[in-house]
Image (cartoon, helix red, strand yellow):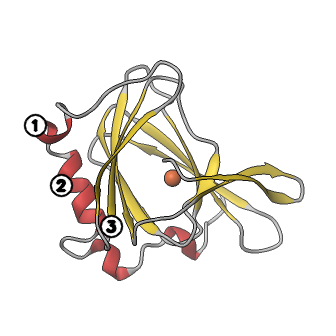
Amino acid sequence: MHAVPYLTVPAPEMARPGGPTSLAMALAACPEWWRPLVDYCLDTRWCQLLEQTEQHEVWLLSWLPGQGTDLHDHGPASGAFAVAAGTLTERVVAKSGRLPTEVTHELAVGHCRAFGPHYVHQVTNSGSVPAVSVYVYTPARTVMNRYQLEPPGLRANGVSVDQ
Ligand SMILES: [Fe+2]
C-alpha cells in the first residue's frame, strides 16, 4: 500500500468543536435526527441538502448495497463525512507526484473521514445492508468534479453541482 500525501490529512480547524468533523460525527450519532429525514432511491444514492450557511453545508445521504459515486472531488471545499448506518468503502486517489497513489478505507458506523480541497475519492456501499452518511462541507461547496483513472493518471470527466 502506498502512503497518500497531504490531501488526506485534515487541517487542524476541521477537528475543532463545531467544525466539519465534529458536526458530521455528532449528527451521524443521532438517529433520532436523521431517521425521520432519510429516504432511499432504487436508481442511485439518495441525498438531501439539510442546512446551508455561509460557513457550511450539511447533506444527508443514503446508499443501497452496490450504490456509489464516481471518482470525484469537491473543488475548493474541505469537508468531513461520517457513517451513521451500514458500512461504506472509500477509495482515495492522490494526484500529486508522477503517478497517482490509491488507498482504500472501510468505514463502519461512527467512522469519519475529513478532507481538504481537491481531495479525490470514490465512495461505495460494498456491504449487504443500506448505509447512511452525513457530509459537512466548508465553505459551502460549489462544484463536484468527476474523474476517471486511466494511464497516466486522473482525467477530468465532468462537473456537477449535486452531491
Ligand atoms: Fe465526496
Which labelled disc corresponds to residue 26? 2
Q: Tell which tag, 2 or 1, sits nearer the viewer.
A: 1
Figure quadrant of the N terminus = bottom right
Kindly report the distance in space between the C-alpha atoms of the residues bearing marks 3 and 1: 22 Å
Q: Residue furthest left?
A: 32
What whole-number distance in Å separates the C-alpha atoms at marks 2 and 3?
A: 15 Å
Question: Are there few (<14), some (14-19), or many (20+) residues within 10 Å of tag 2?
Answer: some
Name the amino acid type tagged 1. Answer: Glu
Q: Give the secondary structure at mark 1.
A: helix
Q: Which of pointers 3 and 1 lies earlier in the amino acid sequence?
A: 1
Percent of width and height locating residue 67: 53, 28
Q: Which residue is mark 1?
A: 32
Q: Amino acid at mark 3?
A: His
- Residue drawn at x 26%, y 47% as measured from the top left: 110
Task: Give 13 or 160, whichever is nearer the viewer.
Answer: 160
The residue nearer to you, when weighing 1 against 93, is: 93
N-terminal of the pair, mark 2 or mark 1, is 2
Q: Nearer the viewer, mark 2 or mark 3?
A: 3
Which of discs 3 and 1 lies nearer the camera? The answer is 3
